[in-house]
Amino acid sequence: MSIEKEIREAGKKKKLLIGSRVVIKALKNGKLKAVVYAKNCPEERIKDLNYYEKISKIKVIAFNGDSKRLGQVCGKPFNILMVGISK
């Protein structure tokens, strides 16, 4: 399944977390299945994600689009840097 399709399905099932602070907090608590970040996400956030990925074994995926496109995929009228898909 493509990542865009997976994000849309998670949004329909109300299992999509939006925003870097919320996603990183859920990642620390082990409540996520996967994290997707936009290609224009700040380097510092990407380093944090990679660190928590190693610890928690949750897959982190680089979205092949910017934050505007990620917002469109999520069905939101604003830019989104990072989304988390709940278990």
Image (tube, rainbow, N blue to C red):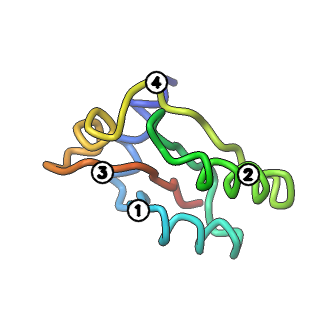
The residues bearing labels 3 and 1 have C-alpha atoms spaced at a distance of 17 Å
Say the numbered circle drawn on residue 64: 4
Q: Which residue is mark 2?
A: 58
Q: Earlier in the sequence, mark 4 or mark 2?
A: 2
Q: Earlier in the sequence, mark 3 or mark 2?
A: 3
Mark 3 or mark 1, whichever is nearer to me: 1
The residues bearing labels 3 and 4 have C-alpha atoms spaced at a distance of 21 Å
Q: Quadrant of residue 71?
A: top left
Whether residues under marks 4 and 2 lie with C-beta atoms below 8 angstroms apart, the answer is no
Whether residues under marks 3 and 4 lie with C-beta atoms below 8 angstroms apart, the answer is no
Q: Secondary structure at mark 3?
A: helix
Q: Amino acid at mark 2?
A: Ile
Say the numbered circle drawn on residue 77: none
Q: Secondary structure at mark 1?
A: loop
Q: Is residue 29 left or right of residue 19?
A: right
Q: Which residue is mark 3?
A: 12
Q: Amino acid at mark 4?
A: Asn
Residue at the location (62% across, 54% down)?
44
The residues bearing labels 1 and 4 have C-alpha atoms spaced at a distance of 18 Å
Residue at the location (54% across, 60% down)?
86
